[in-house]
Amino acid sequence: MDDIFNDRLARYSFMYRSRNSNNEKTRFLKALVTDISQVRKDISVIEYRNQKKDSARNVYVGDIEKADQIVCTYYDTPPAHLGDYVLFDRKKQEKQTTKAGIYSSLIWAFLGILGTLLYMKLVSAPFVLFSVQTACLALIYGGYFIILSKLSKGTWNRKNLIRNTSSILCLLQMLTENKNQRKVAYAFIDEGCYGERGLDVLISSVKKNAKVYYLDSIGADATLNVMGPQFKEELAESKKLRYVSPKDKINYLFSADMNQNNEFHLDKSKLNKKNLNYNHFNQAIELLNQTIKGD
């Protein structure tokens, strides 16, 4: 990979890896728009209302309303969860996220109570409101409740290189390599880890017969899969990719293993890896380019 890719990898893996809060997403989007603007100028940021107090935002490159093909991925950081990441099963993901929030919050609350009891037992000095000791104690409890809040919401997860920083980098790479291609539009979607709201907003803006390609966990060290009506089984097999029968009109390109229940999943060991499978980047971009040109 070239220097531009390595620079993006370093920044999106460390400086902008947490994309949970509105402020974190804003910092990431500023960096993303800056990177894209060096290649393309036709960028738009679309705000839409969600169930939270802050608006969600999708970033579009190209003419979304007129494009024949749109390649997209989500950019928000996945919440902490127990067990594997099971693709295409929102209910199971929600249960795993809820369990992680409950269990980690209970453990942290227990540690907080234990710490308080130890403090009360070891410190015999009378409480003084305005003192260095009280100020330090206030800071400790303030930090404690901030962490507790993050644990309960699942927003303490920062290991998101595989899911889904890798797909962001792949989409940026494709966009850069095809900077003169104006018939294809690109989208970076918000709330992809919590539902289909961001994708629905995108779909509502495209023309009826537009083809949408959705990337997920491209850089994972697992089998690269294609699923969708636009993918040809012969082409996928010629590139040694697993072809999966379409489930709806969206075309999915993702890395995942298949378990005994025929579920696509990524276990913790693969989700937490610090190295990307760069072969998948080349395979994904090459396949998408060939598929799009063949339409």
Image (cartoon, helix red, strand yellow):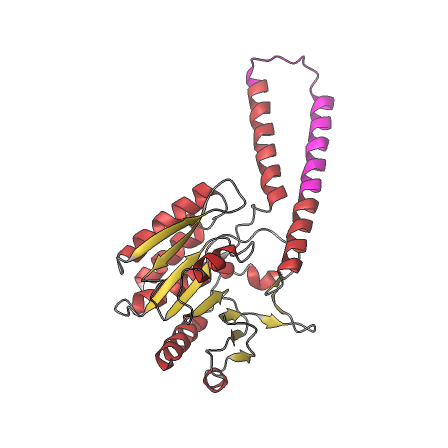
Q: Is residue 129 magenta?
A: yes
- The segment highlighted magenta reads 105-132
Q: Is residue 256 visible?
A: yes
Task: Tell me where residue 70 appears, x and y as whole percent.
Answer: 39, 67
Residue at image point 54% right, 55% down: 193
Quadrant in which the C terminus is drawn: bottom left
Marker count (numbered): 0
Quadrant in which the N terminus is drawn: bottom left
Task: Tell me where residue 53 appears, x and y as whole percent.
Answer: 51, 40
Task: Tell me where residue 148 appears, x and y as whole percent.
Answer: 62, 38
Task: Relative to 149, say whether 188 is above or below.
Answer: below
Q: Mainly helix, strand or loop, the magenta region?
A: helix
Task: Relative to 203, say whether 128 is above or below.
Answer: above
Residue at image point 66% right, 59% down: 92
Q: Is residue 197 magenta?
A: no
Q: Is residue 1 visible?
A: no
Task: Relative to 223, say whether 233 is above or below.
Answer: below
Task: Tell me where residue 88 appears, x and y as whole percent.
Answer: 59, 65
Horizontal side, residue 82 vs residue 203: left or right: right
Which picture quadrant has residue 58?
bottom left
In the image shown, does 222 or 273 lie closer to the viewer?
Answer: 222
Which residue is most to the front? 208
Which picture quadrant has residue 203?
bottom left
Task: Relative to 122, say whether 231 is above or below.
Answer: below
Residue at image point 54% right, 45% down: 51
Residue at image point 60% right, 47% down: 154
